[in-house]
Amino acid sequence: MNDLETGQNPIGLTESISEMASVDWENLVDHRTCVQQNEPLARVQEKFRQADVSFMAVLDRKRVIGLCARHEIGMCLGSQYGFSLFGTAPVRDHLVAQPLLININQLWADVLQRVFSRTGESFNQDVLLVDDRCTFLGLISVQTLVRLQTRLLMQSIVQLEQKQAEISRRNQQLTEDLRMAREVQLAMLPRTVPTIPPEVAPDSSVVRIFSHYAPLGLVSGDFFEVFPIADDAIAILIADVMGHGVQAALVMAMMGALIQNHREAASDPGRLLTSLNRSLCEILKCSNLWTFVSAFSLVIDIGGGQLRYANAGHPCPIHLRRGSGRAVHLDCAQSSNGGVLGVRPDVTYRTGSAELKARDAVLLFTDGLFEIRGEDDDILGQERLLELAAATMSQSGEVLVQELLNGVRGPSLHGEFEDDVCLLAVEIGDIAFEKSRFQVCME
């Protein structure tokens, strides 16, 4: 035999085969048994017996022309008169159909895909390994390739498990960070609300405020602030940052700081929104962050007997006029001339007003309250929300808030909100307005 016909090499799978790396195919060669194309079948059969292999390469010198199989040659020579008829026939006339050749430079994924897509008897054939010139380098058995596939699969599983463990660790850390951010965010919301008169207990205040704050995730882009601007007036601002998650929460925190910086303008809602918008646009420009914030600024002026408000692209609050039994949207058209905050720095927002009477209530909310889908996949919408508010306006305090939430959830397919939700109910007590002062009606 020549050098290409020498013995069998042990299988040597490399110890570290990367998931995407090339395989050293020569290390996987099972044997290099071969015959020249003109050798007679009788001599080929003897080589099969000596080498104890099932397949041999058939060469034209060093170039591969095909593959011959022990059992096919044995069937030819073992049949009646077979040896005398076929013993001297050249092996090139008895090659297996469609042998599989792989190039030494091929990636393992391509090779395994070709090997294991074979069907029938061809599945068990050895694979011919060649170089770029089709020079014979050896034969690799299917069993070796199965072991290779198993090894790669096990390594892939280990790598996936390691990656999954790392992802789980990072997710856990992120969840813990978000929980902490949630606590900080909730701490930024008003824990107590001002009273009118200032010295009375909350239950005795002329103005009582009830809230429902429910982030869709751990953190929210919704926000509200309540603070006194006089002994007989309270300012309220509700805002909704575009989007969800951490970015919205960070912008929300920034809005809270801006409101504190501009509290002196809060008695004039239009002026407050104008100042907030200018500062927000400046910050967003410096950060290259694109976002926007809808906001509604409201002043409950008990002394003046009026509501003063300005709107920056926010859903218009609902005014419950309990004396007349009507629920109406505030006339936001008179105060909405600038759109959302954070887009145009030169906007000047107008201040609108409405008469305030005893036992009135105002509902302020973010769009998550009414952008909820029913069984017909339609959005609830602001007009339907107005109808629900009218149906529950006889309730007061926390009952009013809960009844409205129940009414909104009623037509929902899943009974759950699809966005952050913030709802404020501002109730006016039994008071008598007299020009520039008020009296609390004692029961």
Image (cartoon, grey):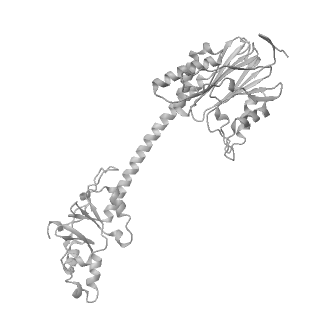
Most distant residue in the right direction: 443
Place of residue 89 in the rendered image (x, y in percent of width and height, measured from the top left): 21, 82
Q: Is residue 116 left or right of residue 106?
A: right
Q: Is residue 360 left or right of residue 154?
A: right
Q: Is residue 204 above or below residue 217?
A: above
| Total count of labels | 0
Q: Is residue 176 visible?
A: yes
Q: Nearer the viewer, residue 154 or 390?
A: 390
Residue at 46% from the left image edge and 25% from the top image edge: 287
Q: Tell me the quadrant of the picture where the C terminus can be found.
A: top right
Q: Is residue 443 left or right of residue 229?
A: right
**Residue 75 location, quadrant:** bottom left
Residue at 61% from the left image edge and 33% from the top image edge: 420
**Residue 271 location, quadrant:** top right
Q: Is residue 344 above or below residue 382?
A: above
Place of residue 329 in the rendered image (x, y in percent of width and height, measured from the top left): 73, 29
Q: Is residue 86 left or right of residue 339?
A: left
Q: Nearer the viewer, residue 307 or 246?
A: 307
Q: Is residue 53 visible?
A: no
Q: Tell me the quadrant of the picture where the N terminus can be found.
A: bottom left
Place of residue 132 in the rendered image (x, y in percent of width and height, measured from the top left): 22, 60
Q: Is residue 113 above or below residue 390?
A: below
Most distant residue in the left direction: 2
Q: Is residue 140 above or below residue 82?
A: above
Q: Nearer the viewer, residue 386 or 21?
A: 386
**Residue 347 location, quadrant:** top right
Place of residue 268 in the rendered image (x, y in percent of width and height, measured from the top left): 65, 16
